[in-house]
């Protein structure tokens, strides 16, 4: 059965259903089996030959996967987004499709502008009078071109490859870094790799101040930064379309239900989210820029 699907071959996991009661699934090639002992209790068993780093990674994957399906969807949607704290202490989220530049924008904000990281791939919006962003843990996935662009990350990437006994290292990238910004040249690291390299720590939550509808394009030319007026139908429709595409509440393409849990009930359709953002006074902007020229971030942070 499929466990997790990704364009990164290492993270496309499959499993075997060994038992239905209690439900037990063995992760193929990991030396790990996971048993559901109760709704809130899971047991991970490892073969004697399994590497501790791989077992730890499997535990992390189980936690993320189960939490995803057990989250309280009534409080708000889960978005495909990275995010940091702006100068006013409120969250600035960068949402967009796969390869839209979310990680690059997070990295530029942290490394160049000294922003505090909030989340790197998914963001849980908790909607009330204000909109609170809850960080959602993930692994760190970087295009090699991004690593080359930032000396602090390039050095950390090269050191990570030389640390063969690193207890968090589960994959190797022996080939030299290439200046490319596509899914085929991405490298995956534990999230602590990024925070150690940049001497930062993720904050768990923050009030949402700005939502950026992002798209980075190599050799694009001049940047575009435009604030949307959510009282206008065309601008509101643009936001609704992005929320529809980048919300994980109506579909989950990566974390598949190997554990037998049902998907959370859809409580926040995109039109309702757009109205909540408008009512909370969240600034929504469209950003189009070249990944090598991101000075426009100064106006967002």
Image: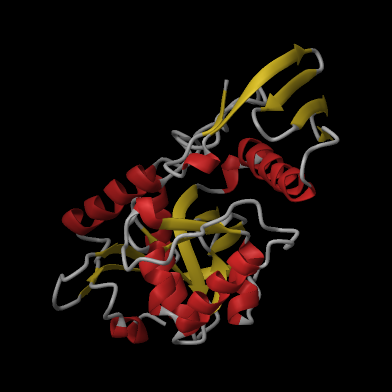
Q: Position of residue 42 (x, y in %)?
A: 81, 33
The residue positioned 57% from the left and 68% from the top of the image is 118
Residue 85 in view here: no
Quadrant housing residue 25: top right
Q: Nearer the viewer, residue 76 or 69?
A: 69
Residue 163 in view here: yes
Q: Residue furthest top?
A: 20
Q: Residue furthest left?
A: 221
Q: Position of residue 72 (x, y in %)?
A: 64, 42
The residue positioned 54% from the left and 72% from the top of the image is 158
The answer to whether residue 260 is above or below residue 73 is above
Q: Quadrant of the N terminus?
A: top right
The answer to whether residue 255 is above or below residue 100 is above
Q: Position of residue 75 (x, y in %)?
A: 59, 47
Q: Nearer the viewer, residue 20 or 204?
A: 20
The answer to whether residue 90 is above or below residue 11 is below
Q: Nearer the viewer, residue 79 or 170?
A: 170
The residue positioned 44% from the left and 33% from the top of the image is 251
């Amino acid at each position: 059965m499929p466990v997790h699907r990704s364009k990164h071959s290492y993270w496309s996991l499959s499993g075997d259903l060994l038992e239905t009661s209690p439900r037990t699934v063995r992760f193929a090639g990991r030396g790990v089996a996971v048993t559901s002992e109760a709704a809130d209790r899971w047991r991970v068993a490892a073969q004697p030959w399994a590497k501790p780093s791989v077992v730890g990674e499997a535990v992390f994957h189980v936690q993320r996967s189960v939490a995803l399906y057990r989250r309280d969807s009534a409080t708000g949607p889960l978005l495909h987004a990275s995010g940091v704290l702006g100068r006013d202490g409120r969250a600035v989220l960068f949402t967009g499709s796969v390869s839209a530049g979310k990680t690059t924008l997070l990295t530029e904000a942290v490394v160049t502008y000294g922003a505090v990281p909030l989340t790197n791939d998914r963001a849980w919006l908790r909607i009330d009078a204000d909109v609170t962003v809850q960080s959602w843990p993930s692994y760190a996935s970087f295009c090699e071109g991004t690593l080359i662009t930032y000396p602090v990350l390039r050095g950390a990437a090269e050191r990570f490859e030389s640390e063969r006994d690193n207890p968090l290292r589960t994959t190797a990238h022996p080939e030299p870094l290439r200046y490319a910004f596509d899914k085929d040249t991405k490298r995956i690291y534990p999230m602590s790799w990024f925070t150690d390299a940049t001497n930062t720590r993720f904050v768990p939550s923050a009030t949402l101040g700005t939502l950026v509808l992002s798209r980075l394009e190599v050799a694009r030319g001049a940047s575009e930064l435009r604030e949307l007026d959510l009282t206008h139908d065309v601008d509101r429709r643009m936001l609704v379309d992005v929320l529809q595409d980048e919300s994980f509440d109506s579909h989950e393409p990566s974390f598949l239900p190997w554990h037998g849990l049902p998907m959370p009930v859809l409580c926040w359709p995109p039109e309702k989210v757009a109205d909540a953002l408008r009512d909370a006074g969240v600034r929504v902007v469209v950003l189009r820029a070249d990944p090598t020229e991101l000075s426009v971030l100064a106006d967002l942070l």
